[in-house]
Image (cartoon, rainbow, N blue to C red):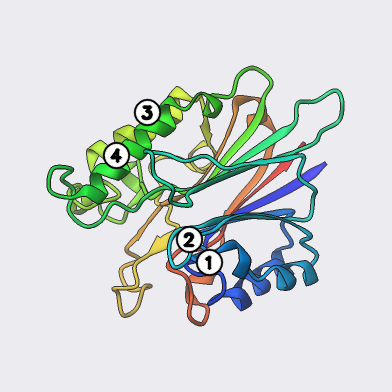
């Protein structure tokens, strides 16, 4: 079975529903994970997605802030929401898909990690302290440690660009939130502790630049190409050999009224 999965921080699903529809019509992923939907569950644009053939939708929404959703052509076997840092912000949802009797179910986690504010000092900035604690809890969360033949995927806006060439200038961004050493260390510790495979960096050498986000602060985002790789797809070891393709839809950053993130997609043969 060919399985196509995309993840996208949409920065308001209602504001950008036409962009999502455009993406789905052309790309036709089996599953789309959205972050920063900024929409309570009862206001989510369900009808638009269902008209596009996405009948199965799992939501963890919040008015005006945060929010994650899984949009699927395939039915869910189960859904679950987890809270982190004793905080009820809508930052996680997981779904599972039934599998053939000879295979383990497919479990998918969708995350929106806190951005962390502008000051990279947990003593001065509670938002940054929250982000670091959130990353620590991901590392220690037992259900995020797939074992043996468990087929797990973790995606989302993890709000950290962990490697030198995940940012446009390693030297200039060492003291900028999303690429500080402590954030990079904590995200990589979570990845390594869970034995996750970072699909992008499993397929693209570490010495090559890879970005999924470009700031709104630049009048022209293409000038200087000052991007960061904040959006991730990780798979458990049991799925490493199943990954057939990986792509970043860079052109989406130039669409009308775009998100500052672009869709990231992987294809697996399950």
* Residue 132 tag number: 4
* Residue 232 tag number: none
Where 140 falls versus 202 (above or below)? Answer: above
Note whether residue 170 is visible: no
Residue farthest toward the top in the current orientation of the protein: 148
* Left or right of residue 167, residue 196 in this image: right
Q: Residues within 10 Å of mark 3 (few under 14, many from 20)?
A: some
- Residue 121, quarter of the rendered image: top left
Q: Give the Cα distance between marks 4 and 1.
A: 25 Å
Q: Position of residue 99 (x, y in %)?
A: 82, 33
Depth check: 222 or 15 in front? 15
Residue farthest toward the bottom in the current orientation of the protein: 256
Q: Nearer the viewer, mark 3 or mark 1?
A: 1
Screen quadrant of the C terminus? top right
Depth check: 91 or 149 in front? 91
* Left or right of residue 182, residue 161 in this image: right
- Give the residue number, with chain letter if any, for mark 1: 39
- Give the residue number, with chain letter if any, for mark 3: 189
Q: Secondary structure at mark 3?
A: helix
Q: Residues within 10 Å of mark 4 (few under 14, many from 20)?
A: some
- Give the residue number, with chain letter if any, for mark 2: 36
* Left or right of residue 248, residue 135 in this image: left
Say whether disc 4 or disc 3 marks the residue closer to the N-terminus. 4
Which residue is rendered at x = 51% and y = 63% of the image? 262
Where 211 falls versus 21 (above or below)? Answer: above
Q: Position of residue 244 (x, y in %)?
A: 69, 42
Tell me whether circle 2 and circle 3 mark residues in contact (CB < 8 Å). Answer: no
Tell me whether circle 4 and circle 2 mark residues in contact (CB < 8 Å). Answer: no
Residue farthest toward the left in the current orientation of the protein: 124
Q: Secondary structure at mark 4?
A: helix
Where 262 falls versus 60 (above or below)? Answer: below
Which residue is rendered at x = 32% and y = 52% of the image? 167
């Amino acid at each position: 079975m060919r399985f196509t999965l995309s993840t996208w921080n949409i920065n308001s699903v209602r504001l950008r529903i036409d962009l999502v529809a455009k993406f789905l019509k052309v790309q036709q992923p089996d599953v789309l994970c959205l972050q920063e939907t900024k929409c309570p569950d009862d206001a989510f644009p369900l009808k638009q997605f269902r008209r596009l053939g996405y009948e199965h939708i799992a939501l963890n929404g919040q008015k005006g802030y945060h929010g994650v959703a899984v949009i699927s052509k395939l039915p869910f076997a189960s859904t679950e929401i987890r809270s982190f840092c004793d905080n009820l912000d809508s930052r996680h949802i997981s779904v599972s898909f039934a599998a053939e009797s000879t295979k383990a179910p497919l479990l998918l986690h969708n995350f929106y990690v806190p951005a962390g504010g502008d000051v990279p000092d947990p003593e001065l900035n509670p938002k940054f302290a929250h982000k670091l604690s959130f990353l620590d809890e991901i590392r220690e969360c037992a259900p995020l440690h797939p074992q043996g033949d468990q087929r797990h995927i973790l995606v989302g806006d993890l709000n950290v660009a962990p490697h030198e060439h995940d940012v446009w200038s390693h030297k200039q961004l060492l003291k900028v939130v999303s690429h500080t050493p402590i954030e990079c260390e904590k995200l990589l510790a979570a990845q390594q502790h869970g034995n996750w495979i970072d699909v992008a960096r499993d397929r693209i050498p570490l010495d090559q630049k890879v970005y999924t986000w470009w700031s709104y602060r630049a009048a022209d985002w293409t000038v200087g190409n000052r991007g960061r790789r904040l959006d991730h797809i990780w798979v458990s070891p049991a799925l490493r050999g199943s990954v057939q393709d990986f792509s970043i839809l860079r052109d989406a950053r130039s669409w009308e009224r775009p998100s500052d993130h672009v869709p990231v997609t992987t294809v697996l043969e399950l």
